Amino acid sequence: MIETHSLDELKALVGREIGVSRWFDMPQSRIDTFADATDDHQWIHVDPRRAASESPFHGTVAHGFLTLSLLPAMLESVLRMRDVKLAVNYGLNKVRFPAPVPAGSRVRARVALAAISPEHSGVQLTFEVTVECEGQGKPVCVAEFLIRRY
């Protein structure tokens, strides 16, 4: 975990990997809860029997958007900005899901600070995030994550 106490300290991190998040478990129960919250009950996510026999992944997999929804928590486990009054999720760029996240696996994120740019009364932080699944060589999510810092 990196802690910063000023914008200048944060600027010194631009262009570097700032850390790797803690591991996040992806049990079937989390996938089912996400399906209920989003009304996305596609069988590949919530029907283990059917997914085992019909899916090319041989079992259920997490929703890509479930993986994506963990980015704020992943970032929080890597970076703490002590001088910030407010930081808000501003959006995402270039999101891709190159590989599935099997139910029962664990994921974590490698986070790099790509850019800091002035925005109104604050700055915009652009993070390059690569989410990896334990035991897999290919990333499961790659995205630019935008945060507005005030």
Image: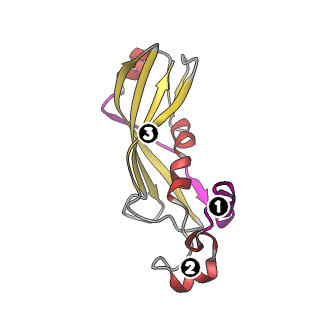
Q: Amino acid at mark 3?
A: Gly
Q: N-terminal of the two: label 3 or label 2?
A: 3
For the point 56% across and 79% down, which residue is it? 51
Left or right: 30 in relation to 52: right
Depth check: 134 or 120 in front? 120
Real-space CA distance between mark 1 and mark 3, rounded to the nearest whole angstrom: 30 Å
The boundaries of the magenta stretch are 14-41
Q: How dense is the environment of label 2, judged by Cα within 10 Å: few (below 14), some, or many (20 and up)?
A: some
For the point 46% across and 65% down, which residue is it? 100
Element type at marker 2? helix
> For the residues carrying marks 1 and 3, which lies nearer the camera in this image?
1
Q: State yes or no: discs 1 and 3 in contact (Cβ < 8 Å).
A: no
Left or right: 27 in relation to 5: right
Q: Is residue 56 magenta?
A: no
For the point 54% across and 39% down, which residue is it? 72
Give the residue pinned by disc 2: 51
Q: State yes or no: discs 2 and 1 in contact (Cβ < 8 Å).
A: no
Q: Amino acid at mark 1?
A: Ala
Give the residue pinned by disc 3: 19
> For the residues carrying marks 2 and 1, which lies nearer the camera in this image?
1
Give the residue pinned by disc 1: 35
Real-space CA distance between mark 3 and mark 2, rounded to the nearest whole angstrom: 34 Å
Element type at marker 3? strand
Point out residue 141 in the picture as x, y percentages from the top left corner: 42, 54
